[in-house]
Image: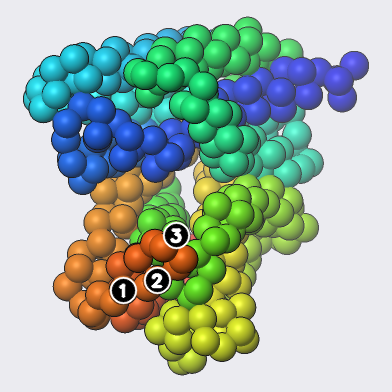
Amino acid sequence: MKNQNKWVRAAIPALLLHCSIGTVYCWSIFSQEIADYIGFSKGATEWAFSFAIFFLGMSAAFLGNIVEKDIHKSSLLAAICFASGMAGTGLFIWYGGAHPGSMLSLIGIYVCYGFIMGIGLGTGYLSPVKTLMLWFEDRKGLATGLAVAGFGAAKAIASPIMQALLGSLGEGGIYKMFLILAVVYFAMMFVGHLLLAKPAGWHEPASTSKGARAIDVIKEKPVTFIGIWLMFYLNITCGLALISQEKMIVKCIGLVGMVGVLSSVTAVFNAGGRLGFSAWADTFKDRNTIYKIIFILSIAATGLVILTQGITNMGQNTFLMVLVLILLFVVNAGYGGGFSNVPTLLSDHYGMKNISAIHGITLSAWAFAGLTGNQMASFIVKRFGQEVELTHGAETIIVNPSGYQMVLYVTIVLYIIAAIISFTMIGKKKSN
């Protein structure tokens, strides 16, 4: 019975919650269409996604205590905020279509997709994590990896559905899609909310000091927490920097016709890294070992493409093209693995007391990386290298191979710093 309950009360609701909120990463699919519909530039609308990731991290940091105290309140809050934010986004897109160029529509989208959905993202991301670790005590990494993989796989699952909706809903399909999906995702998340429950025999461990808070627990090993936060931040920043340029890099190496397929493949590596690296970490005495592996693989793959100038090769050498693809696969897998191993690494060092709140504070790194990763890569590509025209059939594409290559020089330095932190700042596992 207990074995059955862990799937019904933890794994299934976690997937329902994470597969819903993970669709925030589908923004790139319809951002240009939203921009055209409401009469603004794509750059202006892109801030909605950046705000969503920022408020995901910050709401997790500030609302972690609510998750800690009552997962039912937090999961319900997540369902309401995510669905209402999505519906509000649809309504402001509709208003923008009726009043092109209206600042009210753009600000409304920022508030709904960025702030309101961001709160739903942060609380929804946190709510099932501790519950999973309690039900799957012997395989914490596998359990959290399964849920976080749902977050990573959401884009691959939802993308074709959204594209089909956009194609079938006719005029105004973009805002109609948001309204329809708001209902669908609320239903999924509400079912997850109803099912989610901690084990009946679980009792919160007594605090070592009366009224101890998450910040008090962190202060017991401050250097370790700073190290974990920095590792997490650097890994996300590097991942976002490369993933944000992924489509153009794929076009640059001569695979223009395979952009859609390879985008799905890298999404699979992203989700697979979340599940695979976290399950692998269960086999190590020190879970930090998995971060050392992630950073070493990322440094090696990035270094090979830098040394061979694989991107500037422009697809003229098949071996170098393969090296670039391996880099994209490795970075996506490591990006996902970095997410899934954070809660279990924190639990190893700080125990299960206040783990939701501590995990929430750590997710603030995601908030800041969401504002810096993409923008850093865009800045480098604009300032360095030279744009060239690439012809594919009747289509002419503007790419900057030297600019994309320059991004790698920055990310390899950041990966090296992250590896040094992993080897030096992360203390020993807390003894049971």
- Which mark is on residue 374? none
Q: Secondary structure at mark 2?
A: strand
Residue 23, above or below 168? below
- Which mark is on residue 391? 2
Q: Is residue 138 visible?
A: yes
From the image, state whether disc 3 or disc 1 is nearer to you.
1
Q: Secondary structure at mark 3?
A: helix
Residue tagged 1: 389
Q: In screen coordinates, is 135 left or right of 31?
A: right
For the point 31% across and 55% down, the residue is: 374
Q: Quadrant of residue 82?
A: top left
- Which mark is on residue 247? 3
Q: In screen coordinates, is 91 left or right of 196?
A: left
Q: Residue furthest front?
A: 394
Residue 165, above or below 423? above
Q: Nearer the viewer, residue 237 or 351?
A: 237
Identify the amino acid type marked 3: Lys
Give the Cα distance between marks 1 and 2: 6 Å
Q: Nearer the viewer, residue 289 or 325?
A: 325
Answer whether labels 1 and 2 touch (C-beta < 8 Å): yes
Give the Cα distance between marks 3 and 2: 16 Å
Identify the amino acid type marked 2: Thr
Where is residue 413 shown, x and y percent of the image? Answer: 36, 78
